[in-house]
Amino acid sequence: MTRNPKSVALAIAGALLLPSCATQATTSSRSKPAPTDWKVSAVQHGKASWYGIRCNGGTRTASGERLSNHAATAAHKTLPMGTKVRVTNLANGKNEVVRINDRGPYTKGRVIDVTEGVAQRLGFYSNGIVSVKVEVLKNDGN
């Protein structure tokens, strides 16, 4: 069985390039504290749930942005659009800073809806609902 030299060369080049195409996790996918110039201006405790494109009834948020399942964004009933909040999963201590860009949740007892990606990073995607602390962050630099 003979092989075409071009095919062999392409196979070798592909094998050499494949590792350079692999992606690594970035720090944005890990829970991290808010920058030091942000201060907590209010705290809420309650239940959080997650939502995504499949269950949102569309791909746009109340702010008009396109919904991304992996973005660090959330829905809140009353906080102004663009507000940054730190959501902490009280079951495991994981937290992430998210930006409010949608309205909801509309289920009694829930204080915030986060995207699927945030729920995965906070460790409650499979449960669907978790007790959280929501800290409203205010930038002292402004």
Image (cartoon, helix red, strand yellow):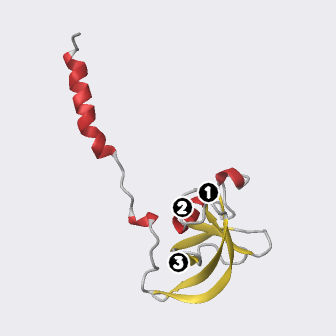
* Above or below: residue 104 compared with residue 22: below
Q: Which residue is mark 1?
A: 67
Q: Which residue is depicted at the point 26% across and 27% down?
A: 11
- For the point 39% across and 58% down, the residue is 25
Front position in the image: 140 or 56: 56
Question: Which residue bears the numbered disc 3?
Answer: 93
Disc 2/disc 1 C-alpha distance (Å): 8 Å
How far, Cα to Cα, is label 3 from label 1? 26 Å
Q: Residue furthest top?
A: 1
Mark 2 lies on residue: 71
Q: Position of residue 32 (x, y in %)?
A: 44, 74
Q: Secondary structure at mark 3?
A: loop
Task: Choose top left, top right, bottom left or bottom right for residue 133.
Answer: bottom right
Label 1: which secondary element: loop
- Asked if labels 1 and 2 touch by Cβ distance under 8 angstroms, the answer is yes
Taking the spot 54% from the left edge, 75% from the top edge, the residue there is 92
